[in-house]
Amino acid sequence: MDAELKNTASEANGRRIDPTCMSHWLPRLQAAGLPVPRTILVPMSREAYRDVFNLFDGKALEGPANEFLRKLAAAAAEIGFPAFLRTGMTSGKHSWARTCYLTDPARLLSHVASLVEFSECVSFVGLPCDWWAVRELLPTTPLAVCPRYEGMPVCREFRCFVAGGEVRCMHPYWPLEALERGGVADPEQVAAQLASCPDEHEVRALAARAGAAVGGAWSVDVLETRRGWFVTDMAEAQKSWHWPDCSVAAGGPRAAPKASVG
Ligand SMILES: Nc1ncnc2c1ncn2[C@@H]1O[C@H](COP(=O)(O)OP(=O)(O)OP(=O)(O)O)[C@@H](O)[C@H]1O
Ligand SMILES: [Mg+2]
């Protein structure tokens, strides 16, 4: 591994970065030539993060967030609209139209504020927002849309748990309960469609390559698009939501939906 990757992985603003953060695993996937969405990573300083909180108190930004917003806006302009916006740790996908689905450059600050708010509330300690990602929106063919998740599309997608280059298990990304809670019409039928994978061998091979590129125990999310399968997300296995009836979950990665980031 070269020095540049090591640095990206371990530090931002002089602080240690959580390996689940995209800034750790994405450069490794890119270096290994895996299909990933075009992505621009933008760091956020502590001062800029604190500045965003002024909005929650009904105040104007004091200034430190402005430079960050300028860089993020430039990244979005380069990627194009609509873009997929998230932090290194989360997309806040259950509030799709307010968080990760960015259609309008004028609404960038509002999306940033929604993601900061979600990151703060998602668990007892909250999720860091040291890194942000602007990604190309991949061309998917949604099998359903969730009205209760602000228009979140549901696409065929699989979560594999890997240990290094070995795939330990593979599941449909969306459990039935998520479709029910999201307000999908005929959730059982959609769940059945989502569970059938025409390219299981290919999905497993991508997950194995991702695991080998990053090393250690991870969840790897692989999304079907009209341009083929893409690796969109990874998280350390013990932090990832895992199907509770999976035997690998019982003996390996813990199922922890509440505090999970993945
Ligand atoms: N670039 C993209 N284009 C289109 N859809 C995307 C893109 N990136 C992610 N998605 C979809 O958005 C949803 C959330 O994406 P992502 O995995 O990046 O967020 P997350 O909050 O980390 O989710 P998780 O809970 O799985 O960790 C997934 O259904 C994924 O397929
Ligand atoms: Mg994630």
Image: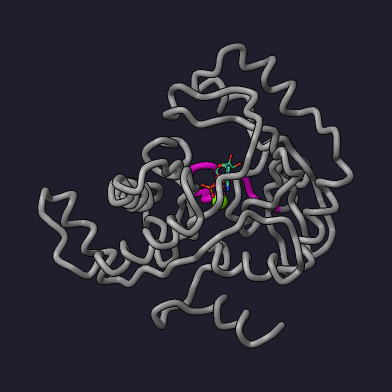
What range is drawn magenta here?
253-262
Identity of the residue drawn at 74% across and 38% down: 171
Q: As rendered, which of 257 and 27 lies closer to the eye?
A: 27
Identity of the residue drawn at 24% across and 65% down: 66
> Left or right: 175 with respect to 32?
left
* Residue 65, magenta (yes or no): no
Can you say whether 182 is above or below 99 in the image? above
Give the image's coloring scheme: one colour
Quarter, ligand 1: top right
Identity of the residue drawn at 85% across and 33% down: 198
> Left or right: 54 with respect to 93?
left
Q: As rendered, which of 21 and 73 lies closer to the eye?
A: 73
> Left or right: 13 with respect to 237?
left
| Residue 211 pos. (x, y %) | 76, 62
| Residue 153 pos. (x, y %) | 55, 30
> Left or right: 44 with respect to 55?
right
Q: As rendered, which of 205 and 74 lies closer to the eye?
A: 74
Q: Residue furthest top?
A: 186
Can you say whether 177 is above or below 73 in the image? above
| Residue 180 pos. (x, y %) | 54, 20
* Residue 255, magenta (yes or no): yes
Magenta stretch, overall SS: loop
| Residue 191 pos. (x, y %) | 68, 22
